[in-house]
Amino acid sequence: MAYKLIAIDLDDTLLDDNLNIPERVRDAIKKAVDSGIYVVLCTGRIPKSTRKYYDMLGLDTLMISTGGAEIYDADNNAVYSRAMDPALVKKLMQYADRNSLHFQVYIDGNLVFRETNKYAQAYEHSCGLKGIVRPDLIEMETVVTPKVLFISDADDIDDIQERVELEFPMLSVKRSKPTYVEFSTPGVSKGDALKFVADYYEVKREDVIAVGDAEIDVPMLEFAGLGVAMENAAPNAKQAADTICPSNNEGGVADVIQKYILEAQNENQTQAR
């Protein structure tokens, strides 16, 4: 199989636990790009916290961000965007307020929350962002955001997800990390966004590889011709995948590129001689 495009999640997939790209992964991605493969970052992060990795890798492909709600080109132009219904955003914020849950939104590409607390600070650290504090966030007449994120403690998050799925059946509700519950417009997913990108590059789905670790990655793992879950992935991501690769701390993405792209290309070249 001659794969032509690989979509890679960031956190707990491309990045190790120290939020770095292992050197062997960077080397493998460079070889893939040099051989003509489309390497696409596909993350729940917003562009501001994704761009540094995009630039570090020297990519010029489309970038899937915000869990598939937005796609940007190399010049930071949005080529695809699906914002949430502001009325539902307000209801989510009010629900979080009633239940003493930390919530945050993303306005004009910025991280926005009502107050600084341990959840906001941890998120800022993990994403390399500085948030904007808006105490009047719930009172704002219109909040336009591609997603809403609830953050809580790991012991509570399963119960929170179960309750919000019942409360908001009209929204897409997914986990992107063990302590995150994300809300987006129905139909928004990394899978739909990856289909858009594959069509953009005129690549068939069977020629696509997707690599991820979380529930939010399941749609892209199912869309791709080859879905790969990290060894450290959530059970539902592993179940959706076709195969498992070594963990993010072991540079598993490099193994995927080496086995399914670089070695396959070498084999095809040998057979063509």
Image: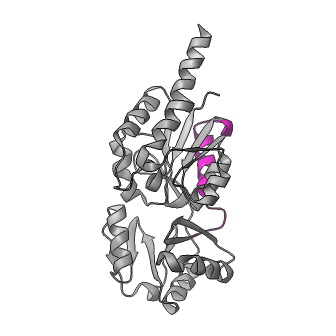
**Is residue 5 in view from this perspective?**
yes
Instruction: State the residue in front, 129 or 20.
Output: 20
Among all residues in the image, which is located at the extreme bottom? 98
Residue 265, percent from left and from top: 55, 22
Instruction: State the residue in front, 138 or 126.
Output: 126
State the image quarter where residue 11 is shown. Answer: bottom left
Residue 196, percent from left and from top: 61, 48
246 falls in the magenta region: no
Residue 29, percent from left and from top: 43, 36
Residue at 62% of width from left, 53% of height from top?
238
Q: Vertical placement of 77 versus 122: above or below?
A: above
Instruction: State the residue in front, 82 or 164.
Output: 164
Residue 45, percent from left and from top: 44, 60
Residue at 53% of width from left, 50% of height from top?
231
Q: Which residues are magenta?
A: 183-206
**Is residue 38 in view from this perspective?**
no
189 falls in the magenta region: yes
Residue at 42% of width from left, 70% of height from top?
107
- Total residue callouts: 0
Quarter holding the N terminus is top right
Among all residues in the image, which is located at the extreme top? 273
Residue at 57% of width from left, 25% of height from top?
264
Instruction: State the residue in front, 22 or 173.
Output: 22
Q: Is residue 11 left or right of residue 265?
A: left
Quarter holding the C terminus is top right
